[in-house]
Image (tube, rainbow, N blue to C red):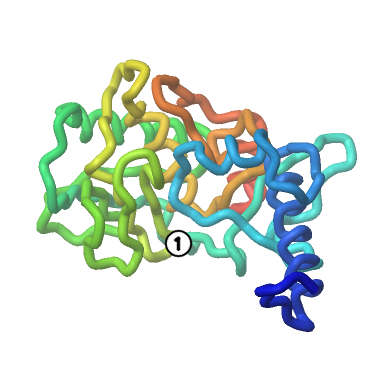
């Protein structure tokens, strides 16, 4: 043993668990599952992400989805439970409450309305904006760092937004990001992220399909607003829709 080494009896066990966790992460993002923090893995980890944490499994399958047809490969996932809005709450009201003013968000309300409509077109849900002081199932707003929900934002280039599963109904956007309805190279497309977060509000967790709206990472300067087949299959399977 080299001088100054601080090895412990359980170091090998720790190394095995770390390698397994890295392999799970690589598998989740369709990378070469080497168990090593190679350049492609580190690059993936550095991408801006949407707010539900990555799933790290320890030898078990933690996906929460219904059985899928062997004729159609699907990658959607549900929150544990799964969690969904009850049948009598198919009309969901939403209100806006922000703790900060954000440049580039002048069209926030109309953008969110468009994002809700994308989900309304493929589900039984209808959505209605109500006044900020009205009763609502969903609350949406911009916030920075610590903002009272126990899930602080981390500044620019980290978590872009986060949303809670049914029936909590909170959706927060990081006010430190540069938001736009027509993003440049260093800006975030507001509608793309809104469509993703509404998926969480309805009960979808992150998908393993990079083409899906519900994929966990996103890049500056791009738009990704259309629901994929995987997104539609996921939400319809969750609510038993045809």
Say which quarter of the image contains residue 14. Answer: bottom right
**x and y, in percent, of residue 185 in the image:** 37, 18
Residue at position x 35%, y 59% from top? 169
Question: Is residue 166 shown left or right of residue 114?
Answer: right
SS for dot 1: loop
Question: Is residue 192 shown left or right of residue 155?
Answer: right
Question: Is residue 187 shown left or right of residue 5?
Answer: left
Decide which of 35, 75 is in the foreground and name it: 35
Question: Is residue 2 shown left or right of residue 89?
Answer: right
- Let me know if residue 132 appears in the view: yes
**x and y, in percent, of residue 210 in the image:** 64, 32
Residue at position x 28%, y 51% from top? 93
From the image, which quarter does the C terminus lie in?
A: top right
- Let me know if residue 242 appears in the view: no
* Residue bearing the label numbered 1: 166
Q: Is residue 137 above or below residue 218?
A: below
Say which quarter of the image contains residue 147. Answer: bottom left
Decide which of 232, 55 is in the foreground and name it: 55
Decide which of 203, 153 is in the foreground and name it: 153
Residue at position x 12%, y 47% from top? 100
């Amino acid at each position: 043993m080299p001088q100054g080494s601080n090895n412990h009896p359980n170091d090998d066990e720790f190394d095995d668990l770390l390698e397994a966790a890295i392999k799970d992460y690589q598998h989740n993002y369709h990378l070469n599952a080497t168990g090593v923090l190679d350049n492609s893995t580190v690059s993936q980890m550095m991408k801006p992400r949407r707010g539900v944490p990555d799933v790290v499994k320890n030898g078990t399958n933690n996906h929460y989805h219904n059985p899928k047809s062997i004729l159609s490969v699907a990658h959607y996932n549900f929150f544990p439970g799964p969690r969904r809005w009850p049948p009598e709450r198919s009309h969901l009201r939403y209100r806006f409450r922000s703790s900060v003013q954000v440049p580039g968000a002048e069209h926030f309300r109309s953008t969110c309305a468009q994002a809700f409509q994308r989900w309304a077109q493929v589900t039984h849900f209808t959505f209605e904006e109500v006044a900020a002081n009205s009763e609502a199932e969903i609350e949406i707003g911009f916030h920075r760092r610590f903002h009272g929900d126990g899930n602080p934002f981390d500044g620019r280039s980290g978590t872009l937004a986060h949303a809670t599963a049914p029936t909590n109904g909170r959706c927060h956007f990081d006010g430190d990001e540069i938001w736009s309805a027509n993003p440049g190279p260093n800006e975030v497309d507001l509608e793309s992220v809104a469509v993703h977060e509404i998926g969480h509000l309805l009960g979808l967790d992150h998908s393993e399909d990079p083409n899906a709206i519900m994929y966990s990472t996103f890049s500056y300067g791009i738009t990704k607003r259309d629901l994929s087949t995987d997104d539609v299959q996921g939400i319809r399977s969750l609510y038993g829709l045809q």
